[in-house]
Amino acid sequence: MTGYVRLEEAQVKQTEKLDIGFFDKYLTVWVALCMVAGVMIGKFLPGVPTFLGRFEYAKVSIPIAVLIWLMIWPMMMKVDFASIKNVGRNPKGLYITWLTNWLIKPFTMYAVAAFFFFVVFRSLIPRELARDYLAGAILLGAAPCTAMVFVWSHLTRGNPAYTVVQVATNDLIILPAFVPIVALLLGVSGIKIPWDTLFLSVGLFVVVPLAGGSLTRFHVIKTKGLAYFNTVFIPKFGNVTIGGLLLTLVLIFSFQGDVILKNPLHIVLIAVPLILQTYLIFFVAYLAAKRLKVAHDIAAPAGMIGASNFFELAVAVAISLFGASSPVVLATIVGVLTEVPVMLHLVKIANRTKHWFG
């Protein structure tokens, strides 16, 4: 029996290694191609995003939600709820996630963005426009990632059960913390948040795939057994997560293609502080985890959650507060543009530095 279990574990690890290695080798190229394809669709086939844009509720795109389910569902099937009970025995990863996202990230985003927009790029960006771009950066900095982090966790071989708790608790903190932080950093009061967008996003991007994945796991194990689930059923979905990611990028960039093509210089200028902030926050969380002797499969997702953004929420709030044509919205869209390539590089860094964690 012991020999069979070891063989089963070896088969699972070998399958995951082949899938992740293959995509690690080509994923950056495919991501770039999908981004370009999305922009071209938005430019030359505008009827496609216009049609798909009709399927929206509370500023949340239903087609994008379906594709995100495609990304997350296979990972949620790996979550054993019995293992979630053990998360409390090792809370350091949660503390790092909470402190990084709510006491550090919004304020470093403000500082880095303000420095570049008002000092480094002051001859290139008018002051009023710089304030708008800073507002967009603030909205991104106050909204830590919800959905996409499951992809980054998957690619870094993160602990799926622990990642779920990290994300779920972050979502709970968003509810009371997002508005006060944004109001403080924007220097205004009476900010209105589209609560229906926030609750719907959390429900669609976390609750639905987690419940669906859990039910799928329960049903397959009950009818076919755990060995079948691990060695036969799960490997069938090895490429589904990345396929969902690539299709999501095509769709997102088809929606924003025209905006991107009309603002090439300012997109580059906005991207600089956003990219630097992403690397900064990743290493703040990642190195803190190393210092506290947190396991790599918890440390890597902690860094990824801090580094990435809940851009669906940031874009929706920017549109709600400032209007769809506002430069604030452009800044949040640049967050979408820069996030995936940068996060893929951070995935490589995390995988190459796994030996730091013993």
Image: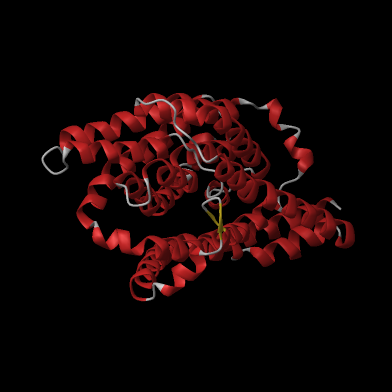
Q: Is residue 92 above or below residue 23?
A: above
Closer-to-camera residue (355/201): 201
Residue 314 visible, this orientation: yes
Residue 308 visible, this orientation: no
| Residue at 89% in and 61% down | 223
Q: Is residue 172 above or below residue 335?
A: above
Q: Quadrant of the C terminus?
A: top right
Q: Left or right of 13: which side holds 323? A: left
| Whole-percent x, y for residue 319 in the image | 41, 47
**How many dots with numbers?**
0
| Whole-percent x, y for residue 175 in the image | 57, 32
Closer-to-camera residue (146/94): 146
| Whole-percent x, y for residue 93 in the image | 58, 30
Q: Is residue 103 above or below residue 319?
A: above
Colour scheme in use: secondary structure
Closer-to-camera residue (9/74): 74
Q: Is residue 41 above or below residue 206?
A: below
Quadrant in the rendering for residue 91: top right
Q: Left or right of 91: which side holds 183? A: left
| Residue at 33% in and 44% down | 328
| Residue at 27% in and 63% down | 261
| Whole-percent x, y for residue 160 in the image | 65, 45
Closer-to-camera residue (317/223): 317
Identify the residue at the far left of this view.
Answer: 123
